[in-house]
Image: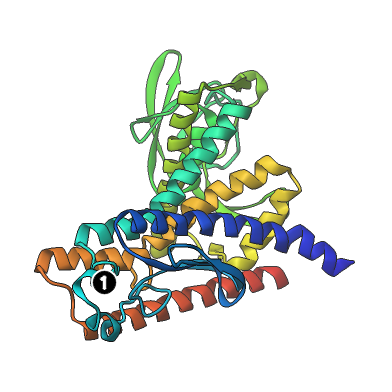
Amino acid sequence: MAIFGFLTGYIIPFILVLSLLVFVHEMGHYLVGRWSGIRVTAFSIGFGPELVGFTDSHGTRWKLSLVPLGGYVKFFGDEDASSRPDEQSISSLSPAERAQTLAGAALWKRAATVAAGPIANFILAIAIFAVLFGVYGRMISDPVVAEVRPDSAASQAGVLPGDRLVALDGEAIRTFDDVRRYVSIRPETPIVVTVERNGQPLDLPMVPKRSEITDQFGNKVEMGLIGIVTNEQSGNFRHVTYSPLEAVGEGVSETGHIITGTFHYIGNLLTGRMKADQLGGPVRVAQASGQMATLGLSAVIQLAAVLSVSIGLLNLMPVPVLDGGHLVFYAIEAIRGKPLGAGAQEVAFRIGLAMVLSLMVFATWNDISNLIG
């Protein structure tokens, strides 16, 4: 029973969410590739041996594979799933056949095909958030302080109950959630909080403290806190609804916040403001999927949107074997007027593969450490 509960509570939600995101990502590559005249030989959800599949009238093999931790689109002339060109095979093709390979297509077509995967993930996230905002709306509150925690950054800076926060580093804010979102990704980073007190603006410099909090599922998360609290009376808690157009705008904004937060997190890792053990892998994603499943379908869908943005950003990293690495190669080709040599690309792919595998091992080690810790 314990194993069955683990499968239904964690593994199955994880596989369903990840498979959806991978499908959308690879479909972006597929659609733009086909539109560009590039032949697609395989579309796989998962890696490894094929479990089930079929071949369509265009010669594309659609399949589900054994290891459900990703997927790929393989184009005509590719050596493997990383879209590395098979130079020996391509050299024997006719000009017409070569034009149907990814390597033989025009530079802009290659760039568009590669970029389409991450872009599809961003579009999916925007669409999910737009639907959630349009259907459910959301609760918001005004950025008015009801309580200031003792010995907090806000207390030391002179924030008082009743102050209304109007800007952070000169950027206007609308809700208390805007404050939380801005501060949480800036631990140990000096910021200027502008408050309105007695009708007058007042700039208060402070440094959010790096703090470890425990969420409702018992997970420990590091973030920046300044130590202010609102309540229903001060914050004027209310439910707002959005028109379809407004919901799309909110979806774009929410996706942008996730992208910004991700870059800040990477910067915090590099500067030591956050610990690297916050970086999670497939085990932590599976755990999060199961936990969100207990909150209902909308929570799982929201997690899918966040993960979709993360997958899009991850694939845009300038690392060979990832989409971003291919785009770097294309940028170099555009500047040089010719592609990098096959030898240089081979070395770059090997280095990129080693980097990706190292990141996966490190993230999985973090997952295991958190589970047994």
Q: Is residue 149 above or below residue 70?
A: above
Q: Residue at x 57, y 21 (%)?
A: 241
* View extreme (front): residue: 57
x, y percentage for residue 208?
Answer: 47, 45
Q: Is residue 107 left or right of residue 160?
A: left
Which residue is labeled 1 in the image? 97
Which quadrant holds the N terminus? bottom right
Q: Is residue 218 above or below residue 320?
A: above
Q: Is residue 311 left or right of residue 267?
A: right
Which quadrant holds the C terminus? bottom right
x, y percentage for residue 10?
Answer: 73, 60
Q: Is residue 268 visible?
A: no
x, y percentage for residue 23?
Answer: 52, 57
> Which image quadrant is residue 290 in?
bottom right
> Is residue 171 or residue 303 the one in the foreground?
303
Q: Is residue 168 visible?
A: yes
Mark 1 neighbour class, 10 Å CA radius: few under 14, some 14 to 19, many 20 or more: some
Q: Is residue 1 left or right of residue 259?
A: right
The colour scheme is rainbow
Q: Residue at x 58, y 50 (%)?
A: 304
> Mark 1: which amino acid?
Glu
Question: Element at badge 1?
Answer: helix
Q: Residue at x 51, y 21 (%)?
A: 243
